[in-house]
Image (tube, grey):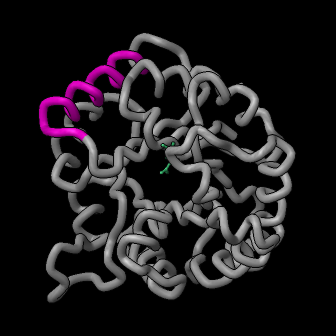
Amino acid sequence: MAKLIAGNWKMNGLLGSGKDLAQALAKRIRSMETNAEIAVFPPGPLIPPILRAVSDTSIWVGGQDCHWNGAGAHTGDVSAQLLADLGCSGVIVGHSERRADHAETDGQVKGKAEAALAAGLKVIVCVGETEAERDAGQMETVVRTQIDGSLPSGGTVDTVIVAYEPVWAIGTGRTPYLDEIGVMHSLIRNRAAGLVLGEGLRILYGGSVKPTNAKEILRIPGVDGALVGGASLTADDFWGIIESCP
Ligand code: PEP
């Protein structure tokens, strides 16, 4: 299966710079070979122009979050249905920045993931331990609890993707040892086996993936791709990661 390289732009980019980045990626994918599946997750208001910029490529576009309800009085939120209606193929839920900034619980993340599936979107469900949890030796318990509580009912390996993102590795330039990533991915795979239907759940690693470390990370058995923050904001760096796919 192709590795999925997903760029989470977070709250970065304006109309001009967002379009420039998407056009630069589209140009590369039109002219160069890659084995990877590529997705970008721009800030919500940039979704329509980014969809247009990549429309004649295989790059798919998604939202960074959605509400668990289909519509209603939820000022500032976006429904999964609207994302699908715009032309998005997927959505990220449960990113650690959402869990921290908006006090999102596993139950809410699960509700968002189920709303995404109901809208026909693929969903990337993020899990990962904080540094304090890791130092306390709780990382496996924390991630197991997040998997049990956040994965949607009714998901299949074609619609649900998990991203293992140790919180302490996000945006810090630090990453776990390669064997630790492999251990956590197999723990997640085993735990999710009864929750997501089918064989071959895709599990992405996220946290300071760069062109310089992508090759070794993407070769770890059980790593099916990467969720990339900072390095997805420049076409050269993001492409460097894409090119690192085996
Ligand atoms: C992320 O926030 O999903 C992420 C992986 O960020 P970075 O690549 O910047 O660590």
Is 19 one of the magenta-colored residues? Answer: yes
**In what quadrant of the picture does the N terminus appear?**
top right
- Relative image position of residue 156 (x, y in whole percent): 62, 68
- Relative image position of residue 57 (x, y in whole percent): 36, 29
Q: Is residue 49 left or right of residue 124?
A: left
Q: Is residue 61 above or below residue 29?
A: below
Q: Is residue 219 left or right of residue 127?
A: right
Residue at 64%, 42% in the rendered image: 174
Is 135 one of the magenta-colored residues? Answer: no
Q: Within the image, what quadrant is residue 71 found in?
A: bottom left
- Relative image position of residue 14 (x, y in whole percent): 16, 39
Q: Is residue 215 above or below residue 32?
A: below
Q: Within the image, what quadrant is residue 143 found in?
A: bottom right
* The residue stretch that appears in magenta: 13-29
**In what quadrant of the picture does the C terminus appear?**
top right
Residue 56 appears in view: yes
Q: Is residue 67 above or below residue 134?
A: below
The overriding secondary structure of the stretch rendered in magenta is helix
